[in-house]
Amino acid sequence: MSKRFTSYLMTIIIISLAIAPAFALGEGNINLLLIAILGLSPMIILLYRRVYYIDILLVLFMLSILIFPLIFHPESMRWSTVLYSYMFTLTFIAYNKLLHKNFFSINNYVEVLKYLIYAYFIVLLIQQFCVLNGLPIFNESNYYPSAPWKLNSLSAEPSHSARIVALLMYVYITAKEIFQNKKYNFSREIKEDKWVWVSFLWTMLTMGSGTAFLFIAVVLLKFMRFKNIFFLSIIVITIVIGIEMLNVNTFKRTFDVLIATLTFDIDTIMKADHSASLRIVPMMIISQMVDLTTLNGWFGHGIDFTGTFLSTLIYGLPPGSSGGGMFQLWMEYGFLSFFLFVFFSLNAVYQKNEYLSLIFWFLLVFMYGVNNQMVWLAIILLYTNKYFYKRKN
């Protein structure tokens, strides 16, 4: 396989995980375009047969989510769920093999990240123009006329775009540090990256998602050093004043949820923002239910078990709904599967002295499940940064 073709394949994998265009979304917001790309991974694996340590962890995890339900709860076995997980895991293995061919330069990688940030910005601008002029909204998905400025850009919904764009920006900054072999200095880099920052901030501040404000703060933590405190404080104060002047309700809701979450009281969190609480509360409930003292604790209660009871414990949740992030994986497949995936994902994303990668891991991997493209985008991008860092050093 040629150097150029390998580079193209890696770029396609990253892009397909980073976007979810409306035309490609099927029932339940399933990204059909992504599934088509994921289907290429077995062929890539057959071409490159070298096995890496991190691949072994994934293979063990794949075996566990197949064998444990079949042995302990065969009545719950849902092949479509397991095969979907396999598509993501095999794609990581394929991507890892392509990455280790060393045909994809860090310069190419930084360019891909930059243009993805631009793409989210441009699509959002087009959508805002459509809303302003009463035109049909370009690439519309999960749109509600009651919240006309809450726009999805290039993902399935605004909150997904907030997470993805923040991740892209953080990874872009970190990748540039690796490429230049020095810390990213905002005042020094702003001339070259001014449009990247404009695209990032405009997208995050105007998409209408409360989640965006939390992730702006996470990205800005990257620059939290003593000599930058004054400069960062000016930026944060300016943003907060602007939000208050515009009376942006989404910011207040995000702040209320953060304060409520610190109480660890489920009712308080749900009263603060019911929609946002549906990401937090299921994880809190299931974390109190998992155990290591029973057979089910080690090998799971069966696929979709959380869907049999979660809606009875959380008001406003449709019957059959599941959730709980990685604790759902523990509940349904058992502690061993949970441990293998957590160990694999932490091993993949953590880069020396980059503690923010652990925050992104928690917010984008641990708080979700295995069958989510955002989870695998986070793992692949953070793993790519780690790979380039190790090569550089």
Image: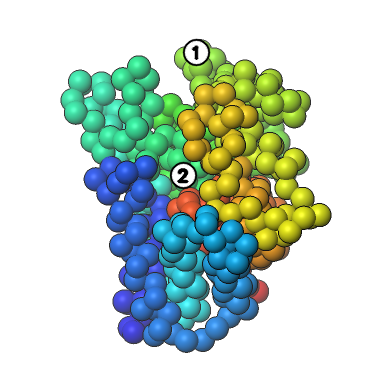
Q: Amino acid at mark 2?
A: Val
Which quadrant of the figure has residue 3?
bottom left
> Residue at the spot x=37%, y=42% of the render?
28
> Residue at the spot x=65%, y=40% of the render?
283
Residue matched to label 1:
247
> Residue at the spot x=69%, y=26% of the render?
266
CB within 8 Å, label 1 to label 2: no
Q: Indicate the position of residue 182 as horizontal and vertical percent values.
A: 63, 61
> Residue at the spot x=34%, y=24% of the render?
144
Q: Indicate the position of residue 299 as horizontal and vertical percent values.
A: 67, 61
Is 209 on the left or on the right of 57, as rendered? left
Q: CA distance from mark 1 to mark 2?
A: 23 Å
Q: Examine the rendering and report whether any part of residue 336 can be seen.
A: yes
Of the pair 316 and 238, the residue shown nearer to us: 316
Mark seen at residue 60: none
Q: Which of the image's four quarters has the C terminus?
A: bottom right
Q: Taking 271 as reference, is 102 above or below it?
A: below
Q: Examine the rendering and report whether any part of residue 114 can be seen.
A: no
Of the pair 151 and 60, the residue shown nearer to us: 60
Q: Amino acid at mark 1?
A: Asn
Residue matched to label 2:
165
